[in-house]
Image (spheres, helix red, strand yellow):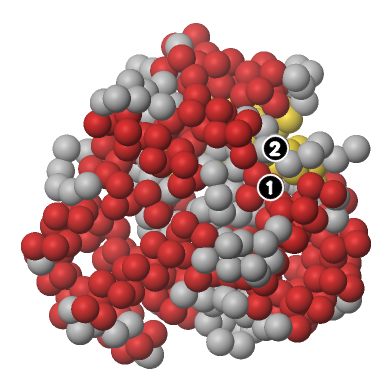
Amino acid sequence: MTPPVGGRRDIRRRLERAVHRHRPVSRAGMTERLFTWLFTGLVYPQIWEDPEVDMAAMELTPESRIVAIASGGCNVMSYLAAGPARITALDLNPAHVALVRLKLAGVAHLPSHEHFFRFFGRADARANLASYARFLRPRLDAATRAYWDRRSLSGRRRISLFSRGFYRHGLLGHFIGAAHLLARLYGVSFRPLLDAPTIEGQRRFFEQRLAPLFDRKLIRWLTAKPSSLYGLGIPPAQYDALAGGREMRVVLRERLERLVCGFPLNENYFAWQAFARGYAPGMDGPLPPYLKHENFAALQAGAARVEVLNASFTDYLRCQSDGSADRYVLLDAQDWMTDAQLNDLWTEITRTARPGARVIFRTAAAPSLLPGRVDDTILARWDYRAEASREFSARDRSSIYGGFHLYVFRG
């Protein structure tokens, strides 16, 4: 039986435990509560962790049993291309749970890859609403169906987002839209970047058009405020880790430079999402693995092996048996955690891990955050692959994070 999507009040309580560090009447406490309120809706129409790097680091096999934070589901869906035995996708946000369940219904019940790509790749066609009514809605669990059928204040159902440019919506989509508006105010169009034929042309665009923006007074002022980055899903605690004691505008300039200049645009769908607010035209541009035609059959074969739950990672593991999983995907969630929460999480990961299990995660800053915070007796059972972590960090096309980290269980 599929567990129901949690209510907004319940999810807010879970997010409060994850995010809140300060008294409500304090300035820091008020910013934490603003973030919590924003984070209860759709945040990530597309997630910003590179699933190809994830799969290379995890070394997936047909026996792999994955426990992963779901977010928008691009990672979980893409892992299916490797044919693992089982994926459990967890998220505190009911919007993300509903999105991943919709994607799984899509790959299982839409009649062709063309239908699937139009729905989740282009995500802007009115024909998607007919596909939802005919192929998806009757096959969704009641809570997920209710989520997508619910109407906004405008009177339109949530599912209509897939006929209106889904990737322009959600907290991240609106943040990117605001960044485009800000760029236009300074006379910057991203069209020349998208048309740049070489990586050298991409660099010229960055140095001539984008880099100077970070010296503007308005942008200096905006980036100095933690709330300005809520649209990226960055809570106050992670803002400090990302800044690392430097001006935030300097850090953001470096991360944007890597996004623009680190990879050719014909290989980097994250850059297309940032600068075109969607994927490249056609079906032969850069795409996440789950949207590629060559992976569609594998996704269809594996969709039934994915379980999507509205639960916290630690709470879920606490209910599992010893040695029950061997791949763990934490995204950047540990940046939010206290030392007590980190130790609780790694106690359960260690208990449920099989020998040779792999844990991957990302951090806003470059170093792993575990040494000195997680008990030494727990970390002693894990081998940190420092060189491999640096290599995977360099390959991550999203360019948002400071570090990618791989730990392997010694047993």
Q: Kindly identify the residue that appears in the image at 80 percent across and 65 percent down.
A: 106
Element on which disc 1 rests = helix
What x and y, as percent, mark residue 263?
A: 39, 71
Which one is in front in this view, the residue at disc 1 or the one at disc 2? 2
Q: Kindly identify the residue that appears in the image at 54 percent across and 69 percent down.
A: 167
As drawn, is 3 to the left or to the right of 249?
right
| CB under 8 Å between discs 1 and 2 | yes
Q: How many marks?
A: 2
Residue type indicated by callout 1: Val
Residue type indicated by callout 2: Gly
Quadrant for residue 317, please give it. Answer: top right
Element on which disc 2 rests = loop
Q: Which label number is shown at residue 97? A: 1
Q: Give the crowd class for mark 2: few <14, some 14-19, many >=20 residues within 10 Å.
A: some
Quadrant for residue 302, please give it. Answer: bottom right
- Quarter of the image for the N terminus: give it: top right
